[in-house]
Image (tube, rainbow, N blue to C red):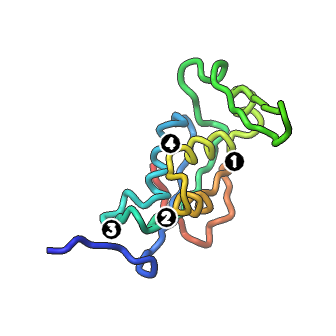
């Protein structure tokens, strides 16, 4: 018996909607990363991009446990000498909760072309509405 290897032309992509209300950011990010990579499918092949599209709504209502809001920081560099910027997660969650989830998911997928392509299939929205009703997404609880 030979091992099944998925081919890029044979991949069928689904659309999923996840409501982030009351969910922990890290556990939600794991679920989203698995869907983006396609690890929930029996035909998963590591070297082929076989993931699905994921829509996450209500990200302003997701929670961080413990003291992460006060102690966790998001760092980025502007490109100029000495311009390392830091933002505390309570400010980040108040102003850009979409970025917080995207950073968490990005850290859980591979840093290669497959991972970069998978991140383009992630759609994160602050409110309950999204513009992808035409794709008939499946709701995940």
- Above or below, 113 against 103 in this view is below
Residue extending farthest bottom: 9
Residue at image position (84%, 35%) is 81
- Quadrant assignment for the N terminus: bottom left
Q: Nearer the viewer, residue 105 or 132?
A: 105
Q: Nearer the viewer, residue 21 or 102?
A: 102
Task: Look at mark 2 in the image and give the residue it sits on.
Answer: 52
Q: Nearer the viewer, residue 50 or 18?
A: 50
For marks 1 and 2, give the one nearer the viewer: 2
Residue 28: assigned label: 4
Instruction: Say which element carries label 2.
Output: loop
Q: Earlier in the sequence, mark 1 or mark 2?
A: 2
Distance from Cα at disc 1 to Cα at disc 2: 22 Å
Task: Look at mark 1 in the image and give the residue it sits on.
Answer: 127
Image location (x, y in percent) of residue 55: 58, 56
Q: Earlier in the sequence, mark 2 or mark 3?
A: 3
Task: Look at mark 3 in the image and give the residue it sits on.
Answer: 43
Q: Is the residue marked by circle 4 packed among few (<14), some (14-19), or many (20+) residues within 10 Å?
A: some
Instruction: Say which element carries label 1.
Output: loop
Distance from Cα at disc 4 to Cα at disc 2: 16 Å
Distance from Cα at disc 4 to Cα at disc 1: 16 Å
Q: Quadrant of residue 64?
A: top right
Distance from Cα at disc 2 to Cα at disc 3: 13 Å
Q: Earlier in the sequence, mark 3 or mark 4?
A: 4
């Amino acid at each position: 018996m030979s091992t099944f290897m998925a081919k890029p032309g044979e991949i069928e992509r689904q659309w999923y909607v996840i409501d982030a209300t009351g969910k922990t950011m890290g556990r939600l990010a794991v679920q989203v990363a698995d869907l983006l990579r396609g690890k929930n499918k029996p035909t998963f092949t590591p070297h082929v991009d076989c993931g699905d599209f994921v829509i996450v709504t209500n990200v302003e209502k997701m929670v961080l446990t413990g003291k992460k809001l006060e102690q966790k920081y998001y760092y980025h560099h502007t490109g100029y000498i000495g311009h390392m910027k830091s933002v505390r997660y309570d400010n980040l969650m108040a102003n850009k909760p979409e970025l917080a989830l995207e950073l968490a998911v990005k850290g859980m997928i591979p840093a290669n072309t497959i991972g970069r392509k998978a991140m383009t299939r992630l759609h994160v929205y602050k409110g309950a509405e999204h513009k992808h009703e035409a794709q008939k997404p499946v709701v995940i609880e």
